Each structure stands twice: as C-alpha cells, then as structure tokens.
Image (tube, helix red, strand yellow):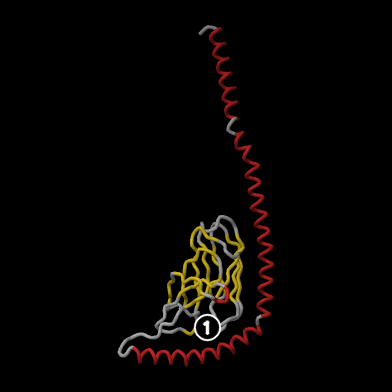
Amino acid sequence: MTRKAMLRLVALSVGLVALGCSDAGNPLEPSSSLSPQLSMASDSAHARHEALKQELEERKAYFKEQKEANKDALKAARAEWKAWKEDWKEQYEAEKRAWKREHPGEKGGPSPDVELMRCAPRDYAAGAAIIGPNGGTLHVGPHELVIPKGALDQEELITAEAPTSSLVDVKFQPEGLQFSRAAQLKLSYVGCVRPTSADLFVVYLGQGNKVVELLPSRDQKVADDVEADIGHFSRYAIAY
C-alpha cells in the first residue's frame, strides 16, 4: 500500500469515529428533555403523599375523640336495643302465626319488605389508611374492605366509620370515590336478630336510612358476615 493510500485510510477512520461519537450523543437529548417532567411528577406525588400522611394523623386523632364521646351513646343504644328486641320477637311471632293460618301445611314464613338488620349495639369503630394503585385492606371493627390492585389510579386517604347503633352500617369516605375495579366489602352480623328464612344483603343507604339499592351479596352464614362488591363510596348496611 502506498503512503498516499495509507493517509486516505487514516483520514477516513478518524471521520467515522467522529461521526459515531456525534450520533452516540443524540439519544441523550430526548431523555434530558424529559427529566424535568419526570422530576415534577415525582415531586407532586411526594407532596400529595406527605399531605395525606398529615391528614391521616388528624383523622386518627378525631376518631379517638369520637370513641371517647360515644360512651354514653353506647349505653343508651343498648337500652334501646333491649326494648326493641322484645317488641320485635313478639311482632315476628305474631306474623309467623298469621302466615301459618293463611298457608296451612306450607313451609316458609312471613316475607316483609326490605328491613334493615338490627344487632346488639357495638362501640363506635373507625379506621383510616392511605391506599394507592397497589390496593390495600381497611378494617373497621369487625368489618373489612379490600381494595384490589388497579382500583385506584393514585393514593387516597380512605376512612370509614361504624357508628354506635343497633344497625350494621358503615360510612366510607371520600364520598363518591369511584373504583376502576370493584372493591370487596364484608359486613359482620354477629349478635344480630336474624329471621331464619331471610336472605341477607348489603344495601346502599341514602338519607334517613332509606334503602337505595340492594347489592348482589354473598351471605356467609358460618362466619356470620355478608359480602358484596362495591364500585363507589357511600354508606352501606345489612338488610333482609
């Protein structure tokens, strides 16, 4: 190879190396332009998480105050429950006798309109948790809410309160929160008055304890609880 040819080869090699270095730098430009956006999203998520943590502590303090304030309410609710239970037994027995007279030889019993289930009053119970896209579980006294993975697109402070009452009802917040996938709600009816022939349902309650909707439910008689899938937050109870 002549000296002139060798010089041309060296020059060509140097040019290719320089071109390669120039091209190798290009892919870095788009990622560097996205970095501020990713950083802003991360900062926003972090700020939201910290705000939710502060709110969580405030809600826990509120729940503790409510539990103390409800001691007298629990005594009153238990006295009311005792009187209601006696009246209910007498009324139900009278309805059974009337039904048997009207349906001689048949099996079954009276089938009233939808009634909210009554139970021995429990103490005020509440729970709160920060739950995000990975899902989570919240316990409220003997009741349980399971939010599956993918149901939420961002972190939310989930709270629930079960008041001192002879009803089995739990109120969830944020009010109206919608799920991309149904959450599973389990309500316990341990200590409740239950007509043996009745099917139990989880119901969506409106104002004045009005039953707005009966949800497709799974009555777990062995465990004394009833389960249903819910798509949004509101106030739920057990009915028959």
Task: Identify the residue under disc 1.
Answer: 119
Q: Residue at x 47, y 91 (%)?
A: 91
Q: Residue at x 67, y 74 (%)?
A: 64
Q: Residue at x 59, y 65 (%)?
A: 175
Residue 194 sits above or below residue 139 on the image:
below
| Residues packed near mark 1 inside 10 Å, few (<14), some (14 to 19) or many (20 plus) | some
User: Quadrant of residue 154 in the image?
Assistant: bottom right
Nearest to the observer: residue 170 or residue 34? 170
Nearest to the observer: residue 81 or residue 15? 81
Residue 209 percent across, percent down from the top left: 55, 76
Q: Is residue 203 rendered to the left or right of residue 60?
A: left
User: Quadrant of residue 140 in the image?
Assistant: bottom right
Q: Residue at x 56, y 87 (%)?
A: 81
Query: Which quadrant of the figure contains the C terminus?
Result: bottom left
Residue 165 percent across, percent down from the top left: 58, 81
Residue 240 sits above or below residue 131 on the image:
below
User: Quadrant of residue 107 in the image?
Assistant: bottom left
Residue 156 percent across, percent down from the top left: 60, 60
Amino acid type of the residue that numbered disc 1 sits on in the rendered structure? Cys
Task: Give the tally of numbered discs.
Answer: 1
Name of the residue lying farthest toward the left: 105
Name of the residue lying farthest toward the front: 102
Callout 1: helix, strand or loop?
strand
Residue 188 percent across, percent down from the top left: 50, 77
